[in-house]
Amino acid sequence: MNTELEDSLADALRAKANAVAPSRMPRLGRAAPARGRLVPLVAAAVAAVAIGGAAIVLAPGDAAPAVKVATPGALAPGEVYYSLRLTSQANGQAIMEKQLWQPRQRTGEWRQRMATGRTIENGRVVPAGAVTPRPGGKCYPAYKVTDENCTAPGSWLNPTVDFLATAPRDPATIGEQFHAAAVAQLEGDQSGDLAYLVELRMIGELLAGNGVPPELSGALRQVVAAMPGIAVTEGMANLTGAQGTGYSLPKPKGNPQTVIFKADNTYLGSPTESIRHGIAPGLGQPPSRMLD
Amino acid sequence: MATEVSGRPAVVPAALEHVLEQQWMPLVRLAALLAGDADAARDIVQDCYEAVWRLQPNVGDPEHFVAYLRKAVLNRSRSRLRRLRTVRRFLAQSRPPADAPPADRSLLVAELHRELLAHVDRLPARQREVIVLRYYSGLSEEQTAAAAGVSPGTVKSSTHRAIATLRRKMKDVPE
């Protein structure tokens, strides 16, 4: 007899399988048409950021913190980095909000708070239920200091605050390193389009994190702008309606992979995501100032 | 279609195509669970089908033939995951951690499923395969063993370990 967990597991697997859209069997016995080679990265990006027809109330701006500062980085004793990330989920049927408090010290304790809803007001998700703090951990994004992504050295793929502070600032150098990292992720697959898609996704994830100095954000924008095939769209809005310049690469299927920057090189997210960074006086406390 | 296969009796490709047509979506859905995304799943099953079509096997025993197709899909899913495992590791690290439960039931259930499936994705490859074959395909331990190319004892222990892991990971999820 199955346990409750096993029943949930079977339900979850069936739900995921049934979400696969019906398709016809292709005709066999002849040269197959060229098929776009999709890596899970691309598909995951589609799943993570796809936006559909849900009723989303867009309200540009953010009611939270009042004071903006131009230069991040300097944390007073006890202060922590704060980020607010909204992501459209499940084809736009839900919006996930994640608040993250992360200390300057890599192995320090971090905390998060999540909320899910269907609408956005003043840059925040209107929770469909209680906002429940989730367990944090140490050494974000690890949970324990012994986790692999805590013990590994800082890199573009494991961007610790210390690494970001000392990482190259030359766009050409950064571009070469990111591209090499993307090709390595693809285990040597040199096919350009795919590697640049991976690279763009990696840069977006890096910029969504904490501790990215403004000059590095500017350099990363130049790296993105120089990618082959990149499409530039002025006045593109992120999930909460903040506008900037969008840089997009087409994916084999689905919406393009996009990153949006403000004129001052602040990273805004994408049409299905919004990112804001700030500084909070302590773990779990409202931000005292925002950096963007 | 049958007339396009020179030198083959018409009845064989017709029967073959019928079985392949019937099994297309079940195998695509199985591959989606094993490989992680639907687009990859269609590619995987199409690759299997192209190979099978070239072989023109006898489908006199459909049950045996479907088991063969299932095993082929599983093997190709493994190959794909091997090639892309580092990409997945990167994504797993960059994905936001688990989220808070919403209020209404459908969202709550969807969120529970999402978290559960995320933990399934992080299981070791063999445990994940066994879980999918047992709990999605509904195969017995023996059938799972045949599909995965392992012993029934390995299926039993892998299932036990996987369920224990999932139970441990899900223990702080509100009921």
Image (cartoon, coloured by chain):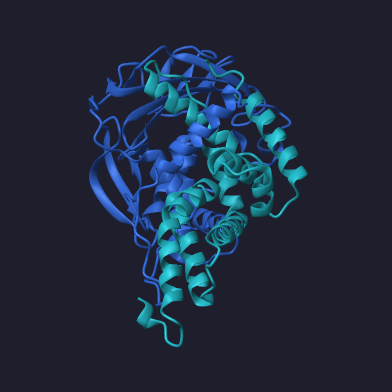
Q: Is residue A268 above or below residue B73?
A: above
Image location (x, y in percent) of residue A287: 44, 16
Residue at position x 25%, y 42% in the image: A236
Query: How many circles with numbers are drawn on the protein?
Result: 0
Residue placed at 51% from the left, 13% from the top? A284
Chain A palette colour: blue
Task: Say which quarter of the image contains residue A159.
Answer: top right
Residue at x-position 53% and y-position 35%: B117
Q: Nearer the viewer, residue A11 or A138?
A: A11
Task: Please state the horizontal and vertical placement of residue A223, each as a whole percent of the image.
Answer: 43, 53
Question: Which residue extends farthest bottom?
Answer: B7
Residue A39 position in % (x across, y down): 48, 55
Q: Looking at the image, is B30 positioned above or below residue A75? A: below
Question: Could you say which is closer to the camera, residue B75 or residue B147?
Answer: B147
Q: Quadrant of residue A136?
A: top right
Of the pair B165 and A63, the residue shown nearer to us: B165
Quadrant where the N terminus of chain B sits is bottom left
Q: Position of residue A131 (x, y in %)?
A: 43, 14
Would you say A227 lies left or right of B170 here?
Answer: left
Image vertical order of residue B145 relative to residue A55, above or below: below
Q: Is residue A189 left or right of residue A257?
A: right
Front residue of A169/A61: it is: A61
**Colour for chain B in the figure:** cyan
**Residue A158 in view in this figure:** no
Q: Is residue A129 visible?
A: yes
